[in-house]
Image (cartoon, helix red, strand yellow):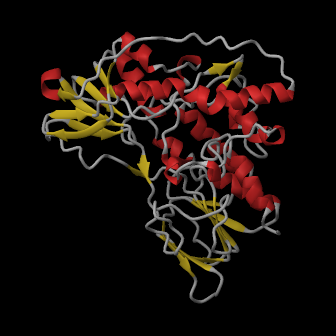
Amino acid sequence: MADLPTSTPAVVIGAGHSGLIMSHHLGEAGREHLVLDRRAELGGGWRDRWDAFQLVSPNYVTDLPGFPYRGPDPDGFMTRDEIAGRVAAYADAIQAPVALGTTVTRLAFDPASPGGFLVETTRGAIRAQEVVVATGAFHTPRIPPTATFNPGFLQVHAHHYRREEQLPPGGVLVVGSGQTGVQLAEELHAAGRSVTLSVGHCGRVPRRYRGRDIFWWLRSLALDGPGLGAGLPTVDQLPDPRAIFACNPHLSGHGGGHDTNLRRFAADGIRLVGRFERADGHRARFAPDLAANLSFADSFFDERFRGLIETFIERAGLDLPPDDRVPFEREVPEVTELDLRAEGISTVLWTTGYAPDYRWLDLPILNEFGVPRHVRGISEIPGLTFIGLLWQHSQASANLVGVAADAAYLASRWDA
């Protein structure tokens, strides 16, 4: 492993797809830089997903600047290893100067160079005039502090879950109904497990609407919508700044891609309960909000996206088939308490997301929620920018649809 330089004009922290896209722009602009990543191999955070993971976005959405998707199945959905491999191939294609096995332990102002930064790593310190933080939006697995189950139950966060066989015999309580939660509930149910799903305040979107995949619509709204007055809402339009932490709408890329309707889950034998409140030994307690959460999920797409899409269709002059969605009605009883031991539940699988962790960022830049202050990724500290943040500009920012556009905007500001 070659020694790191003691200084370089720019450092990118993180070699996932966000960091590599920024490396592409830096290289295109002739800017010398170095990309640091704590991992021993390329592929980014995709390598942390479970064995049967598949993208919820179609393969054509994996276009990267200078590296378009040219595979045989643009409408398919990549597996974990395929998307991680594509990220690694992108690094090779753009000849990104990546230093693997290099954890950044502290980023601070450089006392020896006013206006510069000191990037301390497990392999030594580097001085730089510019730093791009591309560490993603998912840092520390989050488990509620009220999860005080007896030691006899296995508790595992989705970050550490890999396959059904690693779990002890018995039923599984899945806590969280975002994209990960609904996919794992489906997977475990298909494997013959008795599954209970704790449903939170998460929306759902249809796999297809009026003949087009939902990600075709998201990309169109993000890229072309603003010019037609039908763009995705931006972060400054959110009613509450905490809304950036809302779960991603549930959806699946498995089996060729399909809707995930919680009421149909219930009809198929998955038990639904409300939002997890607390545990006491072998008992779990849930809020009496299941009916409200299911109603929120059912109305989410129509309230958040349908109007924008219809406006886009009209103004773009698109001739598309009508909305062919068929409502699925099923009343699901409220359950506010379960005795896990009596129910034969042996595992609690937490799909409760991640908390931000910027303890290594030794700069006065974090807001009251522990995330960086910025405007479209540009911080108040000259030379410090961010990419891949939740709602960096719009809802598309933290996924494959929006990162490239956000990176292009940052690149356009270098000489502004």
Indicate the quadrant containing the N terminus: top left, top right, bottom left or bottom right. bottom right
Asked whether residue 78 is in view, the answer is no
Query: How many dots with numbers?
Result: 0
Kindly identify the residue that appears in the image at 45 percent across and 56 percent down.
356
> Is residue 309 rendered to the left or right of residue 185?
right
Residue 224 found in image quarter: top right
Of residue 18 and residue 96, the one placed in the foreground of this image is 18
User: Does 261 sit above or below residue 367?
Assistant: above
Kindly identify the residue that appears in the image at 62 percent across and 45 percent down.
88
Asked whether residue 243 is in view, the answer is yes
Residue 411 found in image quarter: bottom right
Of residue 202 and residue 361, the one placed in the foreground of this image is 202
Which residue, as the protein is rendered here, is positioned at the far bottom?
112
User: Does 41 sit above or below residue 262?
Assistant: below
User: Does 362 sit above or below residue 92?
Assistant: below
> Is residue 73 rendered to the left or right of residue 252?
right
Q: Pinpoint residue 79: horizontal percent, then vertical percent.
A: 55, 30
Q: Pinpoint residue 43: horizontal percent, then vertical percent.
A: 57, 45
> Is residue 234 rendered to the left or right of residue 175?
right
Kindly identify the residue that appears in the image at 72 percent across and 16 percent down.
211
Q: Pinpoint residue 260: horizontal percent, then vertical percent.
A: 49, 21
Q: Pinpoint residue 221: horizontal percent, then vertical percent.
A: 73, 36
Indicate the quadrant containing the C terminus: top left, top right, bottom left or bottom right. bottom right
Kindly identify the residue that appears in the image at 83 percent across and 41 percent down.
227
